[in-house]
Amino acid sequence: MTRTRPFLAATAALAIASVTALAPVITTAPAAGAAASCTGTSLVQGVGTRDKVRVPTVGNGSGNWHCELGLGNDSVAVARLQIALDEWCNLSAGLTVDGDYGPLTQRAVRNVQHAYHVTVDGIYGPQTAFAMLWPVAGSGGSACTLIG
């Protein structure tokens, strides 16, 4: 029996060390289906037009607009969203374009979500991007289109 205890203790210590070492990896993995954070902007094709619009994307120039922004984000992607929210086609939110996703940007996103009949949660994501109108690049805000 005395020979088994040291073996069991070593095995238990190894198992605990393995779980402890893997815990940060396991807990930092994104949830299945979770959208990546928007960190840049890209020109993407508008729907039914030759016009392009600049939207928040996963990295600069990626074209991948399937990403999210929410309270606490601070980036060029947030600034691009704020510009779009300030246009007449999205209820002219009257935001200061500062790149900071604060309570005023969250409220503007909620208003757009409500107006376009999507889930109202104040988080900008693919559903909101698809539903809202985007100012056409180079139009000075005089023309807007959908993306998708």
Image (cartoon, rainbow, N blue to C red):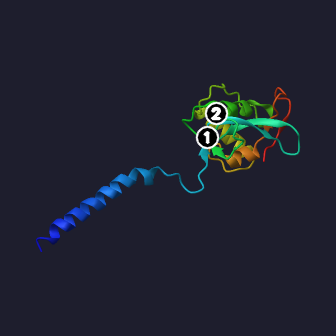
Name the residue: 79% across, 36% down: 53
Q: Residues within 10 Å of mark 1 (few under 14, many from 20)?
A: many
The image quadrant of residue 140 is top right
Q: Relative to 97, is 13 on the left or the right?
A: left
The image shows residue 93 at horizontal and vertical percentages of 71, 31
The local secondary structure at tag 1 comes to loop
The image shows residue 113 at horizontal and vertical percentages of 70, 45
Quadrant location of the N terminus in the rendered image: bottom left
Instruction: Report the residue that reaches farthest toward the right.
Output: 49
Where 74 sits versus 126, above or below? above
Q: Residue 120 or 50: which is nearer the viewer? A: 50
Dot 2 or dot 1: first in sequence order is: 1
The amino acid sitting under disc 1 is: Leu
According to the image, label 1 marks what residue? 69
Where 140 sits versus 46, above or below? above
The image shows residue 16 at horizontal and vertical percentages of 29, 59
Name the residue: 61% across, 49% down: 35
User: Do residues under tags 2 and 1 come within 8 Å of each other at their CB atoms?
Assistant: yes
Name the residue: 82% across, 33% down: 136
Name the residue: 86% across, 37% down: 51
The amino acid sitting under disc 2 is: Val
The local secondary structure at tag 2 comes to helix
Q: Residues within 10 Å of mark 2 (few under 14, many from 20)?
A: many
Q: CA distance from mark 2 to mark 1?
A: 7 Å
According to the image, label 2 marks what residue? 78
Q: Residue 39 or 94: which is nearer the viewer? A: 39
Q: Residue 100 or 105: which is nearer the viewer? A: 100
Q: Relative to 138, is 18 on the left or the right?
A: left
